[in-house]
Image (cartoon, rainbow, N blue to C red):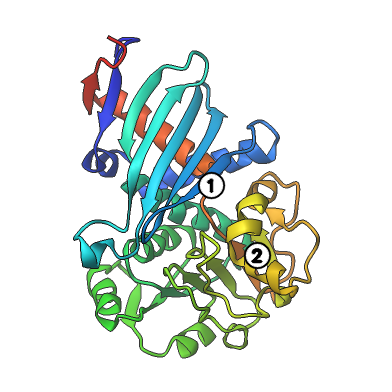
Amino acid sequence: MTPHETLLLTRADVAALLSPEDCAAAVERAFLLHGQGKAPPPASLGVAGIGGGFHVKAAALDLGRSYFAAKVNGNFPDNPRAHGLPAIQGAIVLCDASDGRPLAILDSIEITILRTAAATAVAAKHLARPESAVLTVAGCGNQGRAHLEALARALPLRRVFAWDRDPAAARRLADTSGRAGLEIAAVADLGGAVRASDVVVTCTPSREPYLRREDVRPGTFVAAVGADNPQKRELCPGFLPAATLVVDSREQCTHGGELHHALREGSFAGPPEPAELAEVVAGVRPGRVAPEEITVFDSTGVALEDVAAAAAVFEKAVAEGRGARLALAG
């Protein structure tokens, strides 16, 4: 590439270039650098739309080369049914943070899916019991599928329960996600599945809480992924006070995650500042400290994940000669 060229990378390009393993490694490195104080805090902005809204997230990382990325995502839950469009879509602009050059424009769908699941896999390394073998996935869309794949690589899973308010979605996930040595079953009884699980992932767009604390047995790791704005919620009232909480961003979770709801209700009984995942990865704050702990990862999605994943895609695209080259500065 010349200094005046910008790569245009489609969703197909991203899918071909970014494996779940590479994404998890990139995301873990980003959290480590941030936890070590070697990356500035990420920024985010939410703007309401009609029937949905927009998230603008930005961050910078020094990965041997200094990168800045800004992602604009539209989140419109009714899109698949009403318009035949993805619920989440947008673009990432990746820049050289030393001179401002736009290095690449990337479709954001695949990166958002993979980096969200990668963050949960990183959290599982520190918050799940190492021997965790049974997983419940609540919400069997793109995120459910990505989380199953990511967690199957991070933990010694043997059995998976797939649950969705649309039973057909659960059956599709169970039928098409076969892995050697992994039993996957669609279930109608979420509570029963959770009671038999070591790990529970909630990745639905629900605005009404549905995961009950009494169904979660001691030692379980819960990744609460769906609540990424103040209107969404998956954990029932009283859940967080009984758990050890780690957040991806105190700022974001205070205003839009599961923590937001617990604070609003006055029910959060944890420390004034729950640990961030970056602090846990860097060893600044503890993760799981006892086998019987219920641990919760409150995930709202941070821009550190986006810049790390986008940089990994860009570097591999350059090495393999993939993507369309645009002369934006010409």
Query: In the rendering, at what x and y percent does residue 311 appear?
Result: 42, 31
**x, y percentage for residue 250?**
67, 53
Which quadrant of the figure contains the N terminus? top left
Within 10 angstroms of label 1, few (less than 14), some, or many (20 or more) residues? many
Quick check: can you spot residue 108?
no
| Depth order, front residue of 247/47 | 47
Q: Residues within 10 Å of mark 2 (few under 14, many from 20)?
A: many
- Between 1 and 239, the residue placed more toward the observer is 239
> In the visual, does 292 lie left or right of 12?
right
Q: In this figure, which residue is indicated by the disc labeled 1? A: 302
Left or right side of 44 for 83: left
**Mark 1 to mark 2: distance in Å?**
15 Å
Q: Is residue 100 above or below residue 136?
A: above
Q: Considering only vertical position in the picture, is 1 above or below 204?
A: above
Q: Is residue 136 left or right of residue 130?
A: left
Secondary structure under badge 2?
helix
Instruction: Answer above or below: position of 149 versus 41.
Output: below
Residue at screen point 52% across, 60% down: 229
The type of residue carrying mark 1 is Val
In this picture, is 259 found above or below 11? below
- Image point (44%, 86%), residue name: 190
From the viewer's perspective, tell me whether residue 179 is left or right of residue 275. left
Residue projecting furthest to the front: 50
Q: SS class of the residue under badge 1?
A: loop
Q: Position of residue 71 (x, y in %)?
A: 43, 39
Q: Amino acid at mark 2?
A: Leu
* Residue plotted at (65% across, 78% down): 239
Question: Where does label 2 land, which residue?
Answer: 259
